[in-house]
Amino acid sequence: MAIRRRDFLKGAGLAAASLSLPRLARGTETASIYELERFGNARILHITDAHAQLNPVYFREPSVNIGIGEMAGRPPHLVGRAFLERFGIRPDSADAYAFTCFEFEKSAGRFGKLGGFAHLKTLVDRLRGDVGEKDSLLLDGGDLWQGTGLANTMQGRDMVEVANLLGIEAMTGHWEFTYGEQALRDNLERFKGEFLAQNVFLTEEAAFNDARAFDPATGRVFKPSFIKELGGHRVAIVGQAFPYVPIAHPRRFTPDWTFGIREEELQKHVDALRGTDKVDAVILLSHNGMDVDLKLASRVTGIDVILGGHTHDAVPQPMPVKNAGGTTLVTNAGSNGKFLGVLDLALDRGKVNDVRYRLLPVYSELLKPDPAMAELIGRVRAPHVADWSEKIATPDRLLYRRGNFTGPMDELICTALRTELDAEIALSPGFRWGVTALSGQALTMEDLLAETAITYPETYVQEMTGAEIKTVLEDVCDNLFNADPYYQQGGDMVRAGGLSYTCTPTEAMGSRISELTLNGGKAISASHRYKVAGWASVNGRQGAPVWDVVGKYLRSGRMLQERLGTGVALKGVDGNPGIAG
């Protein structure tokens, strides 16, 4: 189906927000959706969770993103029609396609792919040029270096080159740490911007042994913030890396470092910026996840805006949060290069008087690729394109990952693990990165690597009792639905192949998972031992990389004959707007 420019412009709901009054700005037939009205005297652009997706992608937003307790019915826990109604977006618009799962397959044919760094470069240059380079700033919220076979092979070096050309002036991190300290530091030597992380410190033993740190006196490993003059005013950017790196990933990657949210250290640092450094605005560049940021904003004072990431939530308007010092705006800017956040500040007399915020979808059909960036992408990809371009399967259904409990892409991975490793059950991590494949669209090894490329990809088979399987499900479920956001790590539910279960998200830890059965309907026994396949263990494993195992399965042609799927029945969440349909 031909893509028409008016399809993008007619009724497009490009969201904007003011510190005093959130509002919507709509595109028209005659004005480009990227022509933003000049406001204020400082512009900050923000991307996050690009996961190394250099070229435009399809990416379906979740149809299940359940909020519990105080978060029920509040952004980011809205999907489908509930999301559209909350933000005033027309169901047939390009924004509905970009921000939600609503009629995704139909809209994908109409509006095409989003993102792509050559297209993003064009948009970034335009928006910075509109206000002047000296009055603008480009930030990245982390998860920039990981998510593709290319990035995994090059350990993120490709993305450092891309970041430098794009003009990123500061970033924080998460998956960047999974390359290990040496690779991380080697990349940072080449990165022209600042790497900021106020919440990463040396362990006691590492400090005793004089391990390398930005501030040996405090043990802070990285620079916590930097200050840039924008519009004649001093704006501080504070970095907040993912707080749970040694828990969510193998400890061996960061043995000398401790992480955490570190509220007290953050408050002290913000106070010093406001006091000693006399900055006019404080922006937190965060990889906490949106729920964590909302709680943090209620407890730490002096932060004007949190530019958030990690949970991949694309939220068109910032959420205002009151605290003892005033109001902090909390944002989250989506993933996979699909969006560019535009924060315009009106700064005057040592404070932020007003704010305009827009989360712009990066429609590749509306943006000409920047020639220099396109050349760079082609050059870094060239040595690997031939090896990864083989067509290994053509799916007969939409394959996507994102969603609290399951997705066809993860079901495929679980089925491949069970089949190739001769296991009754498969467990696969609830990663939120990975792109969407349309039905009938050929899958290549490069596509498969975009779902699986990590530095600990080894598959394994082990015996687990039914009780142990339930414990794993309960533990991950608590990470997802704990009423205290500080106990949430931001991923989705572990994917389980070969079994079905019932989940009651509103229950307490240990009581959310019930009625576990094998695919044939036989109840899982607590004492019986089952053969379980998996990958991405935080403990060291010996086994073939997951992409080889899944690739072998796909090449066999069995995917189209075998039934995919894991039955997850939900209780206690009827009417929750975090569930579509």
Image (tube, helix red, strand yellow):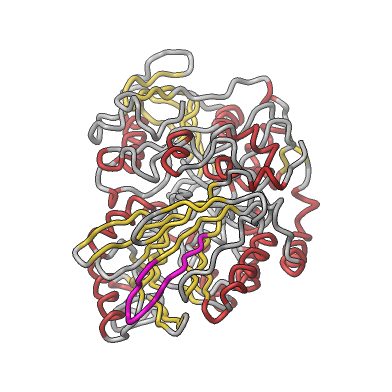
| Residue 432 location (% of width, % of height) | 49, 45
Q: Nearer the viewer, residue 100 or 129?
A: 129
Q: Nearer the viewer, residue 299 or 259?
A: 299
Q: Which residues are magenta?
A: 341-354
**Residue 343 in magenta stretch:** yes
Outermost left residue: 324
Q: Is residue 495 left or right of residue 544?
A: left
Q: Nearer the viewer, residue 407 or 233?
A: 233
| Residue 329 location (% of width, % of height) | 35, 60
Q: Residue at x 47, y 33 (%)?
A: 81
Image quadrant holding the N terminus, namely: top right
Q: Is residue 27 left or right of residue 575?
A: right
Q: Residue at x 36, y 56 (%)?
A: 21
Name the image quarter holding residue 318: bottom left
| Residue 503 location (% of width, % of height) | 34, 27
Q: Residue at x 55, y 40 (%)?
A: 96
**Residue 537 in magenta stretch:** no
How many numbered marks are there? 0
487 relative to 110, above or below: below
| Residue 38 location (% of width, % of height) | 53, 69
Q: Nearer the viewer, residue 261 or 472?
A: 261
Magenta residues, dominant SS class: strand
Q: Residue at x 63, y 31 (%)?
A: 398
Name the image quarter holding residue 255: bottom left
Q: Is residue 435 left or right of residue 474?
A: right
Residue 117 appears in the figure: yes
